[in-house]
Image: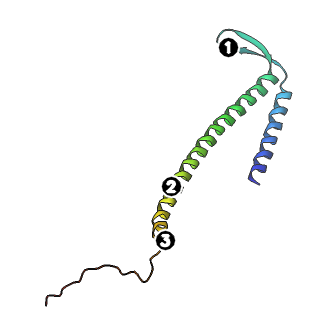
């Protein structure tokens, strides 16, 4: 439901930007470091929106990849700790002790 809400807001935002861009159809002078050019304002607005969206998406993707790596590492650490906890239990149950065997012990002398 949350992703559908984000998608709906994204479409509404894109519609607002497209409407704003179509209303402003005049030419504008763009100053670059190496010169100038005249572009329609529609293309400048839409291009800026696309570049902004792509950059936000790229940074979001990088963060998701970092978090996935961290989750994978934490799962490995958790599995190692779980296997470490299970090892002593497995060793104790692997050697059955029969009740007929006598366990050697030392006699304790009482000095009273």
Q: Which residue is mark 3?
A: 93
Task: Kindly identify which numbered label has been placed on residue 90.
Answer: none
Residue denoted by label 2 = 80
Callout 3: helix, strand or loop?
Answer: helix
Question: Gap between marks 2 and 3, in whole Å?
Answer: 20 Å
Q: Position of residue 65 (x, y in %)?
A: 62, 41
Are the residues flagged by discs 1 and 3 in contact, CB closer than 8 Å? no
Between discs 1 and 3, the one toward the N terminus:
1
* Dots 2, 1 in contact, CB < 8 A: no
Earlier sequence position, callout 2 versus callout 1: 1
Residue 74, horizontal then vertical, whole percent: 54, 51
- Image vertical order of residue 106 relative to residue 78, above or below: below
Viewer-nearest of labels 2 and 1? 2
Mark closer to the chain start, 2 or 3: 2
Q: Residue at x 14, y 88 (%)?
A: 111
83 lies left or right of 6: left
Q: Residue tagged by mark 1? A: 32
Q: Residue at x 69, y 36 (%)?
A: 57
Of residue 87 and residue 93, the one placed in the foreground of this image is: 93
């Amino acid at each position: 439901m949350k992703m559908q809400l984000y998608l709906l807001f994204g479409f509404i935002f894109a519609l607002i930007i497209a409407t704003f861009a179509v209303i402003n159809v005049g030419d504008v002078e763009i100053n670059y470091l190496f010169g100038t050019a005249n572009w329609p304002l529609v293309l400048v607005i839409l291009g800026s929106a696309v570049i902004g969206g792509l950059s936000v998406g790229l940074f979001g993707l990088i963060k998701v990849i970092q978090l996935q790596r961290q989750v994978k590492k934490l799962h490995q650490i958790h599995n190692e700790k779980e296997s470490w906890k299970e090892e002593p239990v497995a060793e104790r149950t692997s050697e059955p002790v029969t009740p007929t065997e006598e366990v050697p012990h030392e006699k304790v002398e009482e000095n009273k």
